[in-house]
């Protein structure tokens, strides 16, 4: 009986692995990516005609969130400017590692950074305020209360970053920390 149960478990695990690989391969083929960092050229055309989505070349989904200072910010308010949307949390070691590079990037370019904190995962807003003070962050920090925007952007690992050009088109996305050189490289590709 034990052998039968073990054999059944092995067969189920093998079946799940094959199923998972097939599904992942189909998603990869549909998305045109096989890694975590994704970059590409949009199809062109009128930005107003492009579909809203999360793929390279799609119009970034609009959102409205409150900042650390209590102001309201909408992504669409930044149309005409290059924007870096970064999802992060204070407890995330890779997020902590990339913050000094993000601040430097913000200071050395005309990029608009919208750093969206996953506030539902934090102990309090005071922790975020303290984090921003400790790292001397001067770019806007937004709170994703209710996790609506992180769900809209399919954020699983943090940090997750989307680079959006002046037309509101996603030009690059990264799942994991970026360093300063990567930020500059992708920034220079955008208009």
Image (cartoon, rainbow, N blue to C red):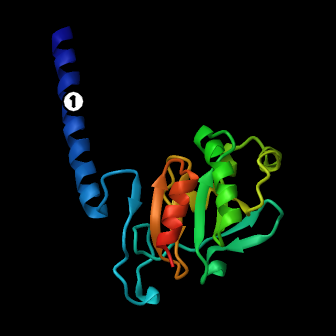
Residue picked out by circle 1: 12
Q: Residue at x 40, y 51 (%)?
A: 36
The secondary element bearing badge 1 is classed as helix
Q: Residue 41 appears at what percent x and percent y?
A: 36, 73
Is 144 left, or right, of 133 in this rendering?
Answer: left
Nearer-the-camera pick, 8 or 138 = 138
Q: Is residue 7 above or below residue 82?
A: above
Snapshot quadrant of residue 6: top left
Residue 18 screen position, x and y as percent: 19, 39
Q: Quadrant of the N terminus?
A: top left
Q: Is residue 99 visible?
A: yes
Q: Residue at x 45, y 70 (%)?
A: 171
Side of 57 relative to 186 (left or right): left
Depth order, front residue of 36/19? 36
Q: Give above or below for 169 relative to 104.
A: below
Instruction: Give whichever of 125, 115 is nearer the camera.
Output: 115
């Amino acid at each position: 009986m034990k052998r039968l149960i073990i054999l059944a478990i092995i067969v189920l695990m093998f079946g799940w692995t094959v199923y998972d690989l097939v599904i992942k391969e189909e998603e990869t083929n549909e998305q045109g990516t096989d890694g975590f960092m994704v970059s590409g050229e949009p199809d062109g055309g009128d930005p107003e005609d492009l579909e809203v989505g999360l793929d390279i070349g799609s119009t970034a989904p609009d959102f409205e969130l409150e900042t650390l200072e209590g102001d309201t910010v909408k992504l669409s308010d930044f149309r005409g400017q290059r924007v870096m949307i970064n999802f992060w949390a204070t407890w995330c070691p890779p997020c902590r590692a990339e913050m000094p590079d993000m601040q430097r990037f913000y200071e050395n370019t005309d990029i608009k950074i919208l750093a969206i904190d996953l506030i539902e995962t934090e102990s309090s807003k005071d922790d975020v305020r303290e984090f921003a003070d400790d790292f001397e962050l001067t770019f806007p920090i937004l709170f994703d209360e209710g996790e609506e925007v992180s769900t809209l952007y399919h954020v699983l690992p943090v940090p997750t970053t989307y680079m959006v050009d002046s037309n509101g088109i996603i030009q690059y996305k990264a799942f994991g920390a970026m360093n300063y050189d990567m930020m500059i490289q992708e920034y220079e590709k955008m208009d």
